[in-house]
Image: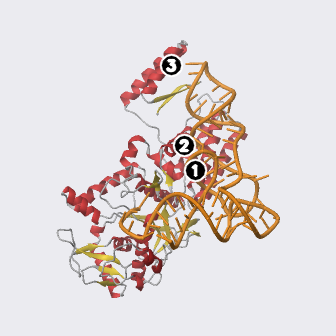
Amino acid sequence: MKIYNTLSRKKEDFVTLEPNLVKMYVCGVTVYNDAHVGHAMSAIVFDIIRRYLEHRGFTVRHVMNYTDVDDKIINRANQLGEDPLKLSERYIADYTNDLKNLNVLPATSYPQVSKTMPLIVKFIEGLIQKESAYAAANGDVYFSVTSDADYGKLSARKLEDMQAGARIEVEEAKNHPMDFALWKSAKPNEISWDSPWGKGRPGWHIECSAMNLAELGEQIDIHGGGNDLVFPHHENEIAQTESYTGKQFSRYWVHNGMLQLGGEKMSKSLGNIVSIKEFLKTRDADVMRMLVLNGTYRAPLMFNDETLDSAEKSVERFKSALKAGSPSASGLSAQSAASLASNAESAQRSFSDAMDDDFNTAGAVAALFELVKAINTSRDNGASEAQLTPAQNTLRELAGVLGLRLAEKTGSSEAEAQVNALIAERDEARKQKQWARSDELRDQLKEMGVTIEDSKDGTAWRWG
RNA sequence: GGCGUCGUGGCCAAGUGGUAAGGCAAGGGUCUGCAAAACCCUCACCACGGGUUCGAAUCCCGUCGACGCCUCCA
């Protein structure tokens, strides 16, 4: 199995630190606002990776953190006159719910900055001792980038290059302009924690190093997040953790591409946002997932009506294969039945081959579409329920590995009773060849959101 | 300006040396009272220009273009 490692810019064989165990840490969100579909993409990407690793027989310890101490949270809380930690708790609950609705499996644990303070302080003290960090006169503590010989290795940049292009206003207290804060001294009326350097709060990067250490230990297998985190966040995490432990931090660095809306990255600061909640009002979670599956997790993902419509149709196509065979089916010949079984096997193989190659979900989905076609052809050729079921189970199982639910939409029981009544009426009209009345009823059902499918075995219907 | 990723049919997109997966859309059929769904058929020489090779979408160089990062960001 191969995974693309941002650190080496190559696909590498996947070898875990311990047999059959994967320690995976994925950067979660800063909780001060509704999460958007870009966050959904990232969550879905790592959910797929996690599900596939488990399918492959690994035990996955999946840690996703919440940044609940941050400038933007504090600002938002001030605006609303709310306690910052209360505010973030609210959005954590909210995001947890979003992820559930997206069919993202729960992580093994969800550490929070506000609950990791003692370890963060200890971590910073350790870095100061090793002379990788220094307390400045202004009460801040900075990491010294020049103390780290290979600083810049993840984002493939050199300190000199960054200095040349830097547009940041440099804090006077820093020894080197690229030094970054491990601890920020508290401003008046700001939430703060005690530390050897006075009241303050952690810098952005140290939290992940500390939470990683607390949850998974000094070394992990996979560290993930959006590729906008490569620099500075993950670069700085590596610098901190490896300076602290003296060991390689994460073996594989995995980054998802950015979701594109109108040709640019969707982000809170650009304001081109579609929240997960808004999205799920009009589309099924499977549609978002199919959009992700159709692409490469590392590449930009186009999010627009056209790509979404296409994803929605793809989901429908998957569902078409799960429909039952006709009760009156004559049954397939032994040869045709064997051919369906062998199609299921080869789909399974192609699926694994694709997924083993850096989670090539587009290839995996293509393999499943081949199986969809084989199943539908078999049904058209008169396959019995019993002949269809094994192949359908394979399809359902593999789609499940990708996190697709493929559930039929449902309505209230009253609505369904009403639909059934109208269909009974229409059947009666059809028996009497009253086509005008029959079509009128079909139109009426269409307006209720019901699609009719007539066949020799009677009339089937579905929502949508 | 620097660093990085990438540029495949109308759209999304797989494919790293041997004559281009898959999905959506479109057109033509089968089925159907008509539809719907399903099935069958049709639909690309891979940004451009050089080079390496018996042979390149796939390797090298250049040009143009897109996106990401260099500042909070999944």
Type of amino acid under label 1 = Val
Mark 3: few, some, or many residues within 10 Å (few <14, many ≥20)?
some
Residue A439 badge: 3
Q: Of callouts 3 and 1, which one flags the residue occurring earlier in the amino acid sequence?
A: 1
Q: Are marks 2 and 1 in contact (CB under 8 Å)?
A: yes
Q: Is A346 placed left or right of A150 in the picture?
A: right
Question: From the viewer's perspective, is residue A367 above or below residue A177?
Answer: above
Label 2 lies in what chain? A
Q: Share a chain, discs 3 and 1?
A: yes
Q: Is residue A105 visible?
A: no
Cα separation between marks 2 and 1? 10 Å
Q: Of callouts 2 and 3, which one flags the residue occurring earlier in the amino acid sequence?
A: 2
Label 1 lies in what chain? A
Type of amino acid under label 2 = Ser
The secondary element bearing badge 2 is classed as: helix
Q: Is A97 placed left or right of A341 in the picture?
A: left
Q: Quadrant of residue A265?
A: bottom left
Question: From the viewer's perspective, is residue A448 above or below residue A183?
Answer: above
Report which residue position mark 2 lands on: A314
The secondary element bearing badge 1 is classed as: helix
Q: Residue at x 47, y 41 (%)?
A: A407
Cα separation between marks 2 and 3? 28 Å
Front-most of residues A300 and A2: A300
Q: Residue at x 40, y 24 (%)?
A: A418
Q: Of callouts 2 and 1, which one flags the residue occurring earlier in the amino acid sequence?
A: 2
Cα separation between marks 3 and 1? 37 Å
Q: Are marks 2 and 3 in contact (CB under 8 Å)?
A: no
Mark 1: few, some, or many residues within 10 Å (few <14, many ≥20)?
many
Report which residue position mark 1 lands on: A365
Type of amino acid under label 3 = Asp
